[in-house]
Amino acid sequence: MIRIILADDHDVVRGGLRTILSGLPDAEVVAEARNGLEAIAQVKKHKPDLLFLDAAMPYAKGIEVLTDTRRWSPDTRVILFTGFTSAGIFNDWLAAGVDAILLKTCPPEDITEALHAVLSGGNYLARAVAEILEAASVTQTLTARELEVLSLIATGHQTARIAERLCISPKTVEKHRTSLMTKLNVNSLAALLAYALREGLLDQERQL
């Protein structure tokens, strides 16, 4: 029997997971947690085979719970189940050693696939997560000048003013803008700025 703990501060999310897992003959939800401290306590008590863990909960963040899980129950496999869609956050979790990442918008079959993958000693990324990470890798190719142009666009500067500030021609500014949109695969200025804010390209506070 696979012993599972569900840790999420939303009752409806835990209920949905419980319903999906109830259809598996070899799975048993042994405990639930509504906040990070409860999650740590339940892991220490039950030492489960699997922990479904939300990224952001009261009292202790998800990564803190992951760290304590590795300390108190090193054999427990951990699946991040999150509503965040930031590549930066995903990379932080992968660096911390999470075994799988699922989005809360994923279909039920992704959950069962992830469960079987991690309990077999493997790792799992939902397709949407892998696509986000792949797209974000493009940002590494942005030049310093492109980032300067992006920052000025974000602060409301028009093409002529950007050209004046950077001592380049308006035509060059437009080329940089086009290059940014192409590299980031967006087709509007609003989408460009939303992407840049989400991924921390404008030095704004990232999602938690």
Image (cartoon, helix red, strand yellow):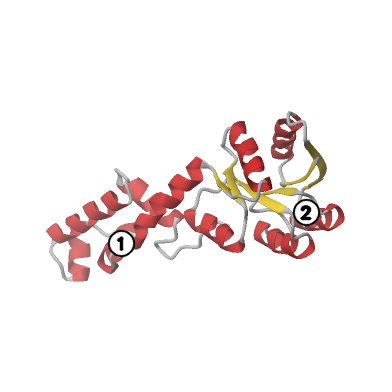
Front residue (pair 95, 34): 95
Query: Measuring 78% from the left and 58% from the top, which residue is drawn there?
Result: 40
Front residue (pair 184, 158): 184
Displayed quadrant of residue 149: bottom left
Quarter occupied by the C terminus: bottom right
The answer to whether 118 appears left or right of 148 in the picture is: right
Residue most extreme to the top: 23
Residues tagged 1 and 2 counted as in contact (Cβ below 8 A): no
Quarter occupied by the N terminus: top right
Task: Name the element at disc 1.
Answer: loop
The count of marks equals 2
Q: Name the residue under label 1.
A: 142
Q: Say what amino acid the circle numbered 1 marks.
A: Leu
Front residue (pair 121, 93): 121
Displayed quadrant of residue 151: bottom left
Query: Measuring 40% from the left and 61% from the top, which residue is drawn there?
Result: 201
Label 1: few (<14), some (14–19) or many (≥20) C-alpha neighbours in 10 Å: some
The mark that comes first in sequence, 1 or 2, is 2
The answer to whether 184 appears left or right of 83 in the picture is: left
- Mark drawn on residue 103: none
Q: Position of residue 124 (x, y in %)?
A: 57, 47
Query: Measuring 52% from the left and 58% from the top, which residue is drawn there?
Result: 91
Label 2: few (<14), some (14–19) or many (≥20) C-alpha neighbours in 10 Å: many
- Mark drawn on residue 39: 2
The answer to whether 96 appears left or right of 157 in the picture is: right
